[in-house]
Image (cartoon, coloured by chain):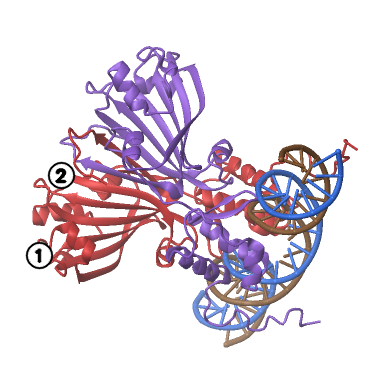
Chain colours: A purple, B red, C brown, D blue
Amino acid sequence: MLDKHRSRDSQDDPSSRPRFLQIAGEIRRQIAIGRLKEQEILPSERSLSEQYDVSRMTARRALEALETEGLVYSADRRGRFVSPQRLKYNVSNMVSFVSTAQTNDVDLRIEVVETAATVADRRLAELFELPKGSPIIAYTRLFYTGDHPIFIETEYLPADRFPDFLQHDLCQSTTQILEKYYDASASTGDIMIRMRGVQTDEAQLLSISASHTVIELEQVIRDAARVPFCFGRQVWRGEMAEFSAHAIVSPQSFDKE
Amino acid sequence: MLDKHRSRDSQDDPSSRPRFLQIAGEIRRQIAIGRLKEQEILPSERSLSEQYDVSRMTARRALEALETEGLVYSADRRGRFVSPQRLKYNVSNMVSFVSTAQTNDVDLRIEVVETAATVADRRLAELFELPKGSPIIAYTRLFYTGDHPIFIETEYLPADRFPDFLQHDLCQSTTQILEKYYDASASTGDIMIRMRGVQTDEAQLLSISASHTVIELEQVIRDAARVPFCFGRQVWRGEMAEFSAHAIVSPQSFDKE
DNA sequence: CGTGCAGTCTGGTATATACCAGTTAAATTT
DNA sequence: AAATTTAACTGGTATATACCAGACTGCACG
């Protein structure tokens, strides 16, 4: 009974790289050379396992590796697809992500997920230099290229300064609404970027599975008088994000801790 | 036969969340409340599988979920540990990451991985506005907190402007070397940040397993005359990074695409 | 003509098992 | 007491199997 599988030297040759990584590499190459194109469907786990003569689990691991890399995404029970190209977001050039995307002929679609009139919690109060409990407008939007979700954005505005804001059509650049109707234009901003695990509600909106990673971007936008008037948080599909910025070394920086 | 009578045994109650996510959540909670502290070892796959009465593979998936989130890291064949706190990096405040880290009492250690005298490829030539083939100095360093790797940095300098640069001790702030000995101080910079899959050599240095994600940060540093004199690329363990920046809306932005 | 209903496809979850190669600490020998 | 062996760990890789539920395709029926 010793010889259960006659696996023998199947993988103990010194080409020691794990089989699933070899397969992942093979597929990666096919994407690189264009044999598999954006949004194209990949071979299924089962067909890969036949093709490479490995178990389904091994084929799966190869695909999962490509998924965490961001090269590939999985649409539950429909298959896996080649991820579309990254979107570039210049955070300095705060002249609205929407309009720059549109001029660079990115097929951008916006969906309003939720709007709310609420009050400032401690953090928002501190940020806007308002008393805790001041009225705040909040709205969450989901951004797509085509039908591919890219990021979720939630923005908070002090309600007093922007009356009837939610009356406007939020499927456009809010920066432009703020400028046009409320004379509030961005002058400076503080930005924070980090990678973290996705939360279940976010995962649903972005149609990624739980226990993936996303990139979170928070920004405070200030007007020429350095008064903060907008706080925003974006949660990006990690593989879709590329942020750039132009930094100017400040004469004296006085934000500490 | 509308009423499909399902067996109500074991765990198919409508709390339908996958078992491995429940377990991951349990551990996550224990980290959050401090029952498991930074750098502390987690229970092994096998002991978790007994504790929760699941197969080892399911326990493993729970731990892997925490790993991709960045809450936990795995040291090959030694166990899994709670990740240390993030490091904050203010990219605007270009006054050297090293010195700011040291004032904020972060236990920073630098290891020189490689130094090289090479020549400019197309990209570097274009960047530094030099002819292709001009001499370039390159060096790669690995940054740690304690014995925990954080990021790899490779920097490129035009050799003509910085003679004998590699003679200096590279285990300190290079920004300061540049300022002190070569009178080159940062005035502006262009920064790019994105998430991507780790490469095998990087994975080794950062001691993470292949098919994880990292954050890549590239920056071009210019002096007061807007002449670029340093190009750097950092590859961060995703869970360790948090970038912040202060942006100023430029009167007219004339960089396109 | 569409409507509904199989049957087949997909990925997602879960279990059980096996072996490998480093790590570590205890046991043993020198 | 120091050096060395050993044995009990660890995570990593891999296979085989099973069932689920949603998505899709095509066929039969009204």
Coordinates of residue B122 in the picture (x, y in percent): 22, 65
The reply to whether residue B42 is in sight is no
In the rendered view, would you say B89 is above or below A190?
below
Query: Which quadrant does the C terminus of chain A fall into?
Result: top left
Residue A103 shown left or right of residue B16 in the figure = left
Which residue occupies 22% across, 54% down? B173
Kind of residue indicated by mark 1: Asp
Kind of residue indicated by mark 2: Ser
In the rendered view, would you say A180 is above or below B73?
above
Q: Which residue is mark 2?
A: B187
Number of numbered discs overlaid on the protein picture: 2
**A4 vs B123, nearest the viewer:** B123
Q: Mark 2: which secondary structure?
A: loop
Coordinates of residue A32 in the picture (x, y in percent): 43, 64
Q: Which residue is mark 1?
A: B160
Coordinates of residue A228 in the picture (x, y in percent): 31, 23
